[in-house]
Image: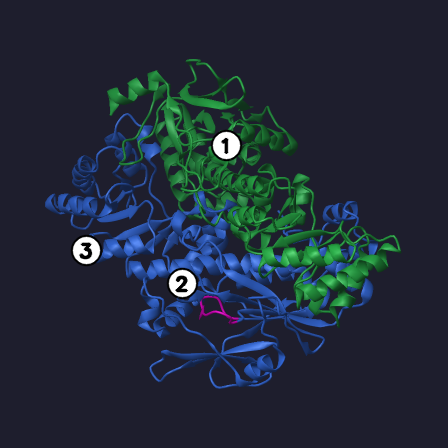
Chain colours: A green, B blue
Amino acid sequence: MTCSLLLDYYQLSMVEVYLKRGLNSRASFEFFVRRLPEKRNFLIAAGLEQVLDYLEGLSFSKEELEFLEEQGFSGELLDYLSNFSFSGDVWAMAEGTPFFANEPILRVEAPLPQAQLVETRIINILHFQTLIASKAARVAIAAGDRPVIDFGLRRSHEAHAGLYAARACYIGGFSSTATVEAGRLFGIPVTGTMAHSYILAHESEEQAFRNFIEVHPKGPILLIDTFDVEKAARLVTKLFHEYASKGINIRGVRIDSGDLLALSKDVRAILDEKGCKEMKIFVSGGLDETRIEELVGAGAPIDGFGVGTLVDTSADAPFLDCAYKMVEYNGFPRMKFSKGKVTLPFRKQVFRNLDEKGCLKEDVIGVMEKELPGIPLLVKVMEDGRIIRRETLTNMRNRLLEGLASLPTDFKRLDSKATHQPMLAEFLNAFLSKNS
Amino acid sequence: MTCSLLLDYYQLSMVEVYLKRGLNSRASFEFFVRRLPEKRNFLIAAGLEQVLDYLEGLSFSKEELEFLEEQGFSGELLDYLSNFSFSGDVWAMAEGTPFFANEPILRVEAPLPQAQLVETRIINILHFQTLIASKAARVAIAAGDRPVIDFGLRRSHEAHAGLYAARACYIGGFSSTATVEAGRLFGIPVTGTMAHSYILAHESEEQAFRNFIEVHPKGPILLIDTFDVEKAARLVTKLFHEYASKGINIRGVRIDSGDLLALSKDVRAILDEKGCKEMKIFVSGGLDETRIEELVGAGAPIDGFGVGTLVDTSADAPFLDCAYKMVEYNGFPRMKFSKGKVTLPFRKQVFRNLDEKGCLKEDVIGVMEKELPGIPLLVKVMEDGRIIRRETLTNMRNRLLEGLASLPTDFKRLDSKATHQPMLAEFLNAFLSKNS
């Protein structure tokens, strides 16, 4: 599926007017989140790479143009689209950067028709990965040094969501994903165990385990909650010793239902008692950061978490109040005054100030032309339609860790409402009070 | 993007065992929703067409197989996948059918490795469209005979979600979508107005309106909340008469922020007073079924609704507790006993019983082999891997209307918790009590 027509009808109507009326000057649009969801104290920027790939590759096929012609769009628009090539600049925060309300994380600077045409798809990409990376970071914080695996594809909102949720979760600190295509496309480690149906297809649980162990002798993990968890755990200890003598190391068990605290303790006791201290216990089933924090806090002997639905849909906050707004046109600042939706004009920069220990002191939202103290978070990543800066997922993961380390401890407590309200540079404040 | 590797790693591990151990008998898996979300009294089946297309088209490319080889999968699995062609049967409820908890809406009957391999993607497709069609039906009920337009692409969970949400919303009773690609792929009517940035790109609101009207003279709709709604409404009435004399009919206005009840009344009064009684008022901005019901109930003079984020993410219930479970293997019923997740064995059928007025009396979940009174809702839609039944979106929309008409009024009240608990056929009840 190409994504060229993944846009709103009005973008085409508007571009048609721009073309016919010669509104072709340079426009700047910024993407930002107006306010944070109730349970988010910070957000994590993600999805930039896909935005840049989209912009660099955007073109319109013959079939797409034919459809637009049937819809009654003019020859002028069709000609424009048939030769379309994005030629603008993009400034953005690097993926993995923590950010706050009203901070632009991306700016497009391009001739107005171009900047308008890409509006919807840019929001669509940035919104989703930022949403999921922000959720995943909370989960990873709750899990501490225990690995977290993304199991979310099945209940993600269709295919792309599953795929890009895997990427965003990895940026947010997960260790791996079950989604094979995410491994192929992004190089994320892929992993998995077995389903209940696998067990049910066999004459007995024992036969199912034996078959799996023999076909997958490299550290198999066995699912033990299809019938009776404790019985299955005892069976696994028997198999552990039997196969150990053949050089096969059963790595662990997974529990996917029931009272995970009580069951993990029972299973740990059985494994330890039967001489399987090195076997790991993984759990899954309805987990999110709150549940993980409870389990960890209660001392559940759990070595890793598989999380899915609640994270890949960001179920407690399934969207962000974000926008892509024009801030400058033809060199002049632009702002709207719609109730509750006033925009900040000018091409802006976010200056991050850390204290001597590397902890966040304050962010100041200023304008591009007036440098202020602090680290400027928006950097140029595309010039004249060409990507000039790419980086690896490993870089993004490291940036996230550094970024989280720089945040006040309060921000990282799940039940805390502490967040940062970026300062507005004096210049912006003065402009706003003069114009509103 | 192909979707062949949009599956969980464990499916490949399990299939590898099946191949090496000769577990190749026919298996039946059923998709169902365990329980309805709190604010859903019924669900609407959707997504079947995409499931069938996926199954019919599933194959693995050279690049995909190479990746699996790098991941250490065996030659046996790679050979199997390189010749893969789905050869099973599928039974399903038609799209647009209302259904309830525990009712299977789709069954795959195929050799075990095939039925297992397609697990995740089938859930991924059916879950999402069913989720959205169910939400959209509530919105359409609240809007009554006023058209509802899908504006949700930008905050949908990535591209596919926006695209298939448009389809599911259309099945659920929406009149059109803003997503152009959904128009091209599915034939859904596409429509739209203009953005605030369009207004801001002009020297004045009036010039922006004039340019739009002149370039799009076929019933333009003008966005009037960029600066001052009432001033803009007065401006529009002036333009209405001026352009009417040139044969151009301004169709209406859109308000996208503020107090929509008060503003729609004010604007209606201005339009009526200035002789523009036929002009329509459309509203958008943070709408869902609850807000629409409030506006309609309060007598807001609104002629149509644009809805987006809250519907396309099903924000009040962003996922369904659904599963794809093995119910039979090699002719024998299968069930698991995991706590809180006991499955119903046997290949099942749902028999819907209506009273003499066509109203829902009861659904009975029975087994395929024992016919019961009522309309069997699952029909064969794929045979030996070939689609044998396709239908139009119009059919699905009509089925939805009939289905909604058959539901008790209680089920259709937004704040009601009334739902239907399907009966279990005596045979199933007896089997369950004997085996649990």
Q: Chain of mark 3?
A: B
Q: Secondary structure at mark 3?
A: loop
A1 or B379, nearer to the observer: B379
Label 3 or label 2, whichever comes before in sequence order: 2
User: Do the residues marked 1 and 3 share a common chain?
Assistant: no
Q: Which mark is residue B299?
A: 3
Q: Quadrant of residue B51?
A: bottom right
Quadrant in which the C terminus of chain B appears:
bottom right
Residue at image position (12%, 43%) is B274
Side of B173 relative to A235 (left or right): left
User: What residue type is disc 3 on?
Assistant: Gly
Q: Which residue is mark 1?
A: A409
A275 or A200, nearer to the observer: A275
Residue at image position (72%, 59%) is A270
Percent x, y of residue B114 = 70, 64
- Tell me, yes or no, if residue B168 can be seen here: yes
Q: Quadrant of residue A202?
A: bottom right
Which stretch is magenta? B93-103
